[in-house]
Image (spheres, rainbow, N blue to C red):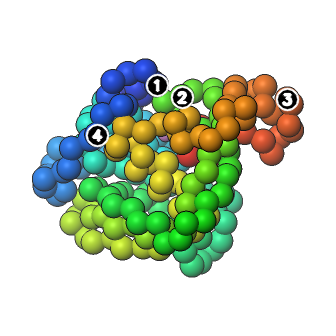
């Protein structure tokens, strides 16, 4: 078990385009995934991308607790357990976007409202080289977009269209109430 240091906004590793993984089944990828999981659970967060632990590879993980899920089945439901996406690709299925609060372990203590596509298709492989091909909606789609953005050097504040909602979680909550802001520090939780 290894809990890794998390890179914070301003570190160049968060601004670069990450490299594709050549062999998703390689032992070093398995070790990386285990360390990312330990780090994410310790933080705690619901998602983590490899560049956030200083590894510029196209790998993300996410795990959404049942109570945070928009639905129990269908595209809005995040598949249970740990989701591993290696070399993911996202395609929006409509132009429609929706704003909601996000946070990020690399931007600690802060939150803001971020527009995201409401319906996407994403493809990837996992660490056993299984092909993943899913349609996602709502929070599920938001988490995937947030995490995959990390692979292209994009942090959520740069996706915001109105920076007036960007601020410290504590202050946003104080001003707008407990439903405002982000409560788990990664991807709109
Ligand atoms: Ni993040």
Q: CA distance from mark 2 to mark 4?
A: 18 Å
Quadrant into which the N terminus falls: top left
Q: Nearer the viewer, residue 51 or 67?
A: 51
Name the residue beneath numbered marker 2.
107
* First in sequence: mark 3 vs mark 2: 2
Q: Are marks 3 and 2 in contact (CB under 8 Å)?
A: no
Q: Is mark 2 within 8 Å of ligand 1?
A: yes
The percent position of residue 11, horizontal first and vertical second, equals: 38, 21
Q: CA distance from mark 3 to mark 1?
A: 24 Å
Report the residue at 25% width, 70% height from top: 130
Q: CA distance from mark 1 to mark 2?
A: 6 Å
Q: Is the residue 107 above or below the residue 65 in the image?
A: above
Q: Mark 1: which secondary structure?
A: loop
* First in sequence: mark 2 vs mark 4: 4
Q: Is residue 56 visible?
A: yes
Q: Is residue 65 left or right of residue 135?
A: right
* First in sequence: mark 4 vs mark 3: 4
Q: Are marks 4 and 3 in contact (CB under 8 Å)?
A: no
Name the residue beneath numbered marker 1.
9
Q: Is residue 11 left or right of residue 166?
A: left
Mark 1 burial class by Cα count in 10 Å: few <14, some 14-19, many 20+: some
Name the residue beneath numbered marker 3.
174
Report the residue at 47% width, 62% height from top: 81
Name the residue beneath numbered marker 4.
17
Q: Mark 2: which secondary structure?
A: loop
Q: Quadrant of residue 17?
A: top left
Q: CA distance from mark 4 to mark 1?
A: 15 Å
* First in sequence: mark 4 vs mark 1: 1
* First in sequence: mark 3 vs mark 1: 1
């Amino acid at each position: 078990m290894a809990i890794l240091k998390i890179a914070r906004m301003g570190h160049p590793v968060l601004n670069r385009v990450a490299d594709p993984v050549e062999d998703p089944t390689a032992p070093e990828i398995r070790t990386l995934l285990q360390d990312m999981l330990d780090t994410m659970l310790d933080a705690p967060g619901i998602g983590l991308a490899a560049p956030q632990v200083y590894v510029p590879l196209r790998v993300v993980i996410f795990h959404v607790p049942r109570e945070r899920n928009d639905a129990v089945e269908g595209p809005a439901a995040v598949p249970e357990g740990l989701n591993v996406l290696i070399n993911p690709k996202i395609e929006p299925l409509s132009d429609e976007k929706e704003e909601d609060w996000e946070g990020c372990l690399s931007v600690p203590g802060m939150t803001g409202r971020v527009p995201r596509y409401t319906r996407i298709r994403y493809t990837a492989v996992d660490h056993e080289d299984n092909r993943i091909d899913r349609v996602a909606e709502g929070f599920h789609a938001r988490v995937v977009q947030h995490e995959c953005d990390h692979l292209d050097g994009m942090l959520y504040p740069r996706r915001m269209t109105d920076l007036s909602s960007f601020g410290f979680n504590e202050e946003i909550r104080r001003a707008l109430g407990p439903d405002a802001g982000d409560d788990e520090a990664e991807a709109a939780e």
